[in-house]
Image (cartoon, rainbow, N blue to C red):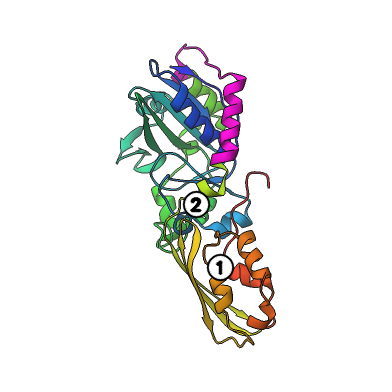
């Protein structure tokens, strides 16, 4: 197969690169490329980030949050995870499977979209159709931080929270355990690149195309509307003991905006919270936006002794930072 080189580790650029290549490359021949992301959680096209991702953990650990153009579930990436993309008429993960086998890994396809080794998952992939061509992209866990993976996706009601880290470890594994002669992920990437290319040459994107990828990365894939705004529904409850007493908040979201909110508890204030509740309706569910509304009210009168920042933190977890921030 012909190939492209993509050395970026920015998840927003890389997801934009995927979309551009799918929509602009010729479908006559299959094309592949291998790539990596800085620590990031990538949610599926239709997922609600608030119910699928531990946003507090991402924020505290500098893990990026992004949304891809394909369906499926949320995945954790770091620099020890190698991603692949194949674009063509009817692409399949079979070349990846055969490449792993040629390196001595007894890999097999299992389920709808997974690759397993010894009954444990090392890869998952997703698919998207565009006109006369398709794209599949997937993960290859080489030496991924399993603890970070678990905590990033560990939220109430998630598949991970019930059984915890030990159970997850029993269901997934890293390819490093099966590739003792590979010195690291860079060598794995080079070997897979050679096997998949099988003598075919490199394709390149023009500077104009790369500029378009960067523009779309910033305007679409890194935007609040794309990452958070596509989240539909979601109900939350939080409680905190503050100087005025216990403050509970119940809220609902619609497309990541507050559609309903109410404060309750045994707190004692001089003014009711109803005006604040009314003004918060329709607000983006982000820390800066919520804090801006709260700062327009006399919080000391509603929740004596509490700061606007404390009430904001009670209501919402801030959006995750981008790589390097």
**Secondary structure mostly taken by the magenta-highlighted segment of the chain:** helix
Residue 270 image point, x, y percent: 64, 87
Mark number, residue 229: 2
Image coordinates of residue 272 in percent, x first then y, are 58, 83
Residue at 61% in and 88% down: 268
- Magenta region: which residues? 195-220
Can you identify the residue that label 1 sits on? Answer: 280
Point out the image quarter for the N terminus: top left
**Left or right of residue 66: residue 170:** left
x, y (%) of residue 21?
Answer: 48, 26
Q: How crowded is mark 2: few (under 14 residues within 10 Å), some or many (20 or more)?
A: some
Q: Does the magenta stretch include residue 278?
A: no
Q: Nearer the viewer, residue 117 or 128?
A: 128
Taking 26 as reference, is 311 left or right? right
* Residue 201: in magenta span: yes
Instruction: Say which of 40 and 280 sits in front.
Output: 280
The answer to which quarter of the image holds residue 129 is top left
Quarter residue 25 falls in: top left
């Amino acid at each position: 197969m012909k190939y492209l080189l993509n050395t970026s580790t920015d998840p927003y650029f890389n997801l934009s690169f995927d979309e551009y290549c799918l929509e602009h490359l010729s479908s006559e021949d299959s094309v592949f490329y291998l790539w990596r992301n800085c620590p990031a959680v990538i949610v599926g096209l239709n997922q609600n980030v608030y119910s699928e991702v531990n946003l507090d953990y991402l924020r505290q650990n500098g893990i990026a949050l992004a949304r891809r153009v394909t369906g499926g579930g949320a995945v954790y990436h770091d620099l020890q995870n190698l991603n692949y993309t194949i674009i063509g008429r009817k692409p399949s993960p079979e070349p990846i499977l055969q490449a792993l086998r040629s390196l001595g890994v007894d890999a097999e396809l299992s389920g709808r979209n997974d690759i397993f080794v010894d009954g444990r998952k090392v890869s998952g992939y997703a698919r998207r159709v565009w006109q006369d061509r398709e794209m599949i992209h997937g993960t290859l866990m080489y030496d991924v931080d399993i603890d970070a993976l678990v905590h990033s996706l560990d939220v109430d009601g998630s598949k991970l929270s019930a059984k915890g880290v030990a159970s997850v470890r029993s269901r997934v594994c890293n390819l490093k355990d099966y590739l003792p002669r590979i010195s690291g992920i860079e060598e794995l990437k080079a070997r897979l690149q050679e096997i998949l290319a099988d003598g075919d040459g490199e394709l390149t994107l023009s500077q104009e195309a790369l500029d378009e990828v960067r523009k779309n990365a910033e305007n679409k894939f890194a935007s609040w509307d794309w990452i958070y705004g596509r989240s539909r529904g979601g109900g939350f409850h939080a409680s905190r003991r503050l100087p005025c007493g216990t403050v509970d908040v119940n809220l609902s979201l619609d497309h990541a905006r507050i559609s309903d909110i109410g404060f309750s508890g045994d707190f004692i204030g001089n003014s009711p919270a109803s005006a604040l509740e009314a003004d918060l309706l329709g607000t983006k569910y982000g820390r800066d936006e919520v804090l801006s509304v709260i700062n327009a009210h006399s919080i000391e009168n509603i929740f004596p002794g509490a700061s606007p920042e404390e009430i904001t933190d009670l209501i919402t977890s801030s959006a995750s930072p981008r790589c390097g921030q």
